[in-house]
């Protein structure tokens, strides 16, 4: 299995038994309705999430998805410390990125998974 296949995504509300590897929360804000003691996660890397301004602008509007994808990818390129923390986990084994958004196809974890998978397979840090 290539390392590109070792980054998964799941909602924080999904059953932890249905996830693989280290569980990283990648939202800037703690998920609503989830007790910190109850979320089975290995690390909360809030700094890898989109900026508050970008998140509010996007508002989970699928019509803004292409522009959000481009802007968030640019933020990731300028945020190497947080990206490196994620990549450290990826190098140890499978990782599941946890997010709270209802939309499983239009959220930052989708973009981050692709970004990390590309970085992990290219050997870049």
Image (cartoon, rainbow, N blue to C red):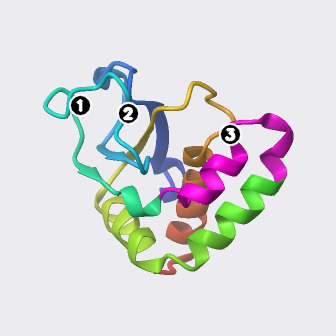
Please tell me in which quadrant of the rendered image residue 72 appears: bottom right
Tag in front: 3 or 1: 3
Residue 62 among magenta residues? yes
Please tell me in which quadrant of the rendered image residue 38 appears: top left
On-image quarter of the C terminus: bottom left
Vertical position of residue 63 compared to residue 68: above or below? above
The extreme right residue here reads: 63
Name the spot of residue 94 as percent of width and height, x first.
36, 48
Q: Pointer 1: what residue?
A: 39
Name the spot of residue 54 as percent of width and height, x first.
65, 57
- Tell me which numbered mark, 3 or 2, is placed earlier along the sequence: 2
Query: What separation in Å lies between label 3 and label 2 (alpha carbons)?
Result: 16 Å
Q: Pointer 2: what residue?
A: 31
Residue 2 among magenta residues? no
Q: Pointer 3: what residue?
A: 59
Q: Nearer the viewer, residue 51 or 74?
A: 51
């Amino acid at each position: 299995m290539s390392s590109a296949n070792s980054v998964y995504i799941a909602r924080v509300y999904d059953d932890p038994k249905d996830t693989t590897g280290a569980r990283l929360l990648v939202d800037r804000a703690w998920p609503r309705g989830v007790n910190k003691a109850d979320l089975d996660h290995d690390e909360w890397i809030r700094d890898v999430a989109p900026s508050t301004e970008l998140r509010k602008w996007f508002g989970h509007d699928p019509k803004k998805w292409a522009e959000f994808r481009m802007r968030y990818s640019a933020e990731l390129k300028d945020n190497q410390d947080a990206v490196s923390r994620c990549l450290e986990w990826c190098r140890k084994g499978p990782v599941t990125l946890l997010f709270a958004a209802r939309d499983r196809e239009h959220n930052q974890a989708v973009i981050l998974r692709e970004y990390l998978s590309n970085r992990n397979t290219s050997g870049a840090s």
